[in-house]
Amino acid sequence: MISALHTATDAHGHTKATPRNVALDRARTFLTLVVLLHHAVIPYTHFGHTDPASWIGFDMIVLATDSFFMAMFFFLSGLFAWSGIARKGPQDYLADRLRRLGIPFAICAFTIIPLAYYAISLRHHPEIGFSQFWWTTITKGPWPSGPIWFLWVLFAFDLVACVLCRLSPHLLDPVNRLSLRGRRRPAEFFAVMLALTAAFYVPGLMYFGPSDWFEFGPFSVQHGRVMLYASYFFFGAGIGIANMERGLLAADGRMAEVSWEWTVLAIVPYCLLWALIFVKREVLGNPSPLPNWYEAIYAVCVTVFSVAIMFLILAFFQRFRRSGSARLLDPMQADAYGMFLVHYPIVLWLQYWLFDHDWPAIAKAMIAFVLTVILSWAATAVLRMLPGAKRVL
């Protein structure tokens, strides 16, 4: 998802390669583990509850992760979009993205995803064979995309970025200037990003609701969140236009010095989300649809939490970039993208096998998470040994 080399612009406006930013690499690897954790605990939550065992602590995890991690993935991916287009040209850039995103999406849609959802189908239809299930999925549907919806949406954003960059190369310069000021005044960038992401997200959520999805074969995306994801992507693209190492994400920037403020800004809206959930269940009686005022307040809290937790994570990895504990993520960095792609059938089949065991939810979730990490990492390492696989994975 993040290119092999970061880029910067010299005094003459020429794009040049720069060493990797290890803090961003570790943040991306950390997010990959968050994705695996999110999918490992969902069956053991109150709202998911597809397993006899559940624990409220997993609801707390899922509420937090679902509110930020995919938006942050789009932000990190966007960091290298505009500079990559300028360096390679739109045609070569899109060819590269098609290889990195389009090929994995197509392969996963026809293999990984049916294999994953077959585990769920067996629970309800134990007599169905995999070949029958696969053919029905491909020809009649539904054809869910699981987590790989991220790939085609990201490619769509890359395509839009190429068009915009060609039409107006300086379109995102204001974001870049804001990033440069953010080196010493990160709160200014935070406030602008919060305002604009809320402006894109709140109306969409109120209009479409939280559960409405666009679906066409394996192509799906949540209607109410697509503009939120787009805003994160283009904020990242604006930061990455030039001088990223001297802007908001600079190694010596002030963002990492005020991590306690991001912590407070994340905790407060997160607690408010739980208060709103209580109001929905105990006061409003779980109405459908929910009142507009409720959806608006909920969306604002999600927006504040999402931006704040992203700043907190980035600040943490910038601040402790030389820490030994942060380096624990480094061995997994090269395989993180592959782990994202292959983990879904692994975690769903582990949950299928754990279903009939009368074990506590914490035990089941930990087994599912740890084994998913180990097996998806091992599978990716094997796949990357195939000829040409490293160009894709």
Image (cartoon, grey):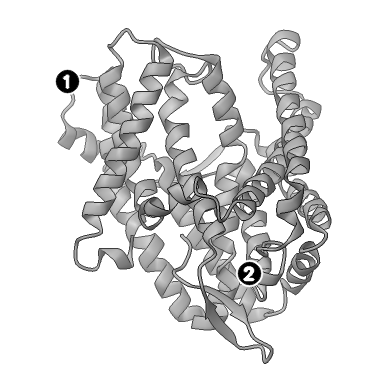
Identify whether 150 is placed above or below 295: below
Q: Which residue is mark 1?
A: 127
* Residue 92 horizontal side relative to residue 67, left or right: left
Which quadrant holds the C terminus? bottom left
Outermost bottom residue: 12
Label 2 vs label 1: CA separation? 52 Å
Q: Which mark is residue 75?
A: none
Q: Which of the two discs, 2 and 1, labels the residue nearer the N terminus? A: 1
Helix, strand or loop at label 1? It is loop
User: Residue 382: x percent and y percent?
Assistant: 21, 53
Identify whether 209 is placed above or below 178: above
Helix, strand or loop at label 2? It is loop
Q: Which of the pair 291/3 is nearer the observer?
A: 3
Q: Which of the pair 288/233 is nearer the observer?
A: 233
Q: Amino acid at mark 2?
A: Gly
Q: Which residue is mark 2?
A: 240
Identify whether 59 is placed above or below 356: below
Q: Is residue 140 visible?
A: no
